[in-house]
Amino acid sequence: MSLGITEIVLIVIVVIVLFGGKKIPELARGLGKAQAEYKKAKETFENELNTFKAETAKSADTKKALKKNSTKKSATAKKTTIKKTTKKSAK
């Protein structure tokens, strides 16, 4: 459903009658400011969300790297323990 010319004209006439010619520019200015504020808040939220996602991904990568390193260290420690145990039992 789209608005035709007659519907738009009727809406404009009703707005002029209700608010008067002097109030319409003030209303338009207020709507413009509200729209600009909305866009600013939206951009700020998106930037914070992207920053949070990047930090979360970085944190996850760091945790994976630490886990990988600790797994390597524990495997090396187990091999060393096995070698020492084998040498002691061979004596």
Image (cartoon, helix red, strand yellow):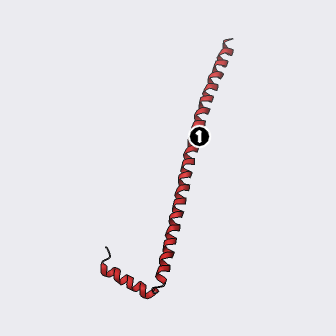
The N terminus sits in image quarter: bottom left
Taking depth in this image into account, of 71 and 8 the one nearest to the observer is 8
Taking depth in this image into account, of 46 and 91 the one nearest to the observer is 46
In the displayed orientation, state which residue is furthest to the top: 91
Question: Residue drawn 53% across and 67% down?
Answer: 37
Q: Answer left or right for 16 relative to 36.
A: left
The quadrant in which residue 82 appears is: top right
Q: Which residue is mark 1?
A: 62
Label 1 crowd bin: few (<14), some (14–19), many (20+), radius 10 Å? few
**Amino acid residing under circle 1:** Thr
Q: Position of residue 40 (x, y in %)?
A: 53, 63
Question: Residue drawn 42% across and 85% down?
Answer: 16
Q: Answer left or right for 48 relative to 9.
A: right
Residue 30 lies, with reference to residue 38, above or below; the image says: below
Taking depth in this image into account, of 90 and 41 the one nearest to the observer is 41
Disc 1 is placed on an element classified as helix
Residue 46 lies, with reference to residue 77, above or below; the image says: below
Residue 40 lies, with reference to residue 65, above or below; the image says: below
